Image (cartoon, grey):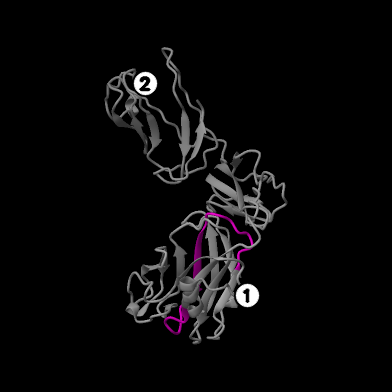
Amino acid sequence: MKNFLLTCALLGASIPAFAAGNVITYVNCDANSFQNFTNNYTNDWKLKNSADQYWTVKNFNNNNGGWEDFIRTGWRTAAIVGSVTTDFMIAEQVGEIVVDVWQCKTGLNDKLNKASIYVADNLDFENAAEYDFTDKVTTDEFEQAVSVKITAPKANQYYMVAFDCGKASNNGFIQLAGITYYEHEGGEVPALKPAGLSYDWTEYEAVLGEDFVAPTLNNPNNLSVVYSSSNTDVATVDVNTGKVTLVNAGLVTITATSAATDEFEAGEASYVIAVQGKSDTDGVLFSFNPLKENQIESVNSYSDVWTVKDGDLEWTVAYFNNNKNGWDFVRAGNKNVDYVPFIETDFASNGTVASLEIDMEIRSGGTPTKATVYTSSTDDYTNAVSVDFT
């Protein structure tokens, strides 16, 4: 296969029978293409072809340039994924990729878990289309040209060829000599249609201990979908049915995802659930009482942070005034500065708070921009649930 690649590049030779169309580009894994030398299986480095196009190579060894017409991946020390990725977007629609690869060693643990080509419009390969060719990689040295059809060709894409190798018996048991990209034959393929997944609403509230009925996914094209939860500590979801089980108070995003098909783009739709705790008691758990005797500091400004203590419980009070302890209440609001006064428990509740009763008054025609209660299981309010009561 290597000889063909060189001939094609230099002489413009005819395309063999397995090719889908004209050669768009290629890269040979030879000494002329190595932009860096390495003698391990964990470095990132570059290949370059005669058209000055570059590929990023990860977790392949070139024996410090000593292997003049191939590179190898697979490592005895750990499982690795060797990959070769275009640094450039290929403008044409690629219809076929030929990978010159073979498994050159066959020790007990020389296992190729997966060989795939990923196609995406971004170098992070988010929502990439995947083409698995694991079963085509052979141990026959004379059957190295693996042809992979790109069944949903698209213009302006990046391409990654990847080999997922388990912890091996031998170093370098997968050998790669080159990759050739062929243009789709038969004219432009129509653009894929949008998947069309959606929910009527994207925000929902739920109460822990009560049933939550998941909203119906709008799936007009009847695509196959899977469901996932962003925070399984708050809620889990059945991957196939979308049924949600509440676990703890907090915020969670439920996402339905469909893979790309020959007709439709990959798609997803999400909604957020704010899960609130449910009290096990009808009694009062605790109260914030800013009486004079509970005010630890004496302040006469709207810019101080101080403490209210009632028994063993303490609250942090920020940007409220107590008129040098002349008030059995506190006041906030500064006509000169925009800021956010707050009152925060310095303790975690020993019970589940189902509701709050807030005794407050808006004076002098003032209007708060926003009034919110935040609850969280952590003091940095990660994944906090917010309730707006403006």
Residue 30, quarter of the rendered image: bottom left
Residue drawn where x is 57% and y is 66% of the image: 22
Q: Residues within 10 Å of mark 1 (few under 14, many from 20)?
A: few
The amino acid at mark 1 is Ala
Q: Nearer the viewer, residue 90 or 158?
A: 90
Q: Residues within 10 Å of mark 2 (few under 14, many from 20)?
A: some
Q: Is residue 302 above or below residue 313?
A: above
Q: Is residue 288 left or right of residue 274?
A: left
Q: Give the residue type that dot 2 points to.
A: Gly
Is label 2 in a helix, a strand or a loop? loop
Image mark for residue 17: 1
- Mark 1 or mark 2: whose residue is earlier in sequence: 1
Residue under label 2: 333
Q: Nearer the viewer, residue 187 or 12?
A: 12
Give the left or right position of residue 323, taking residue 126 as reference.
Answer: left
The reply to whether residue 256 is visible in this rendering is no
**Where is residue 301, by image quadrant?**
top left
Q: Is residue 308 above or below residue 141?
A: above
Q: Nearer the viewer, mark 1 or mark 2?
A: 1
Residue at image point 47% right, 31% down: 372
Magenta residues, start to end? 149-175
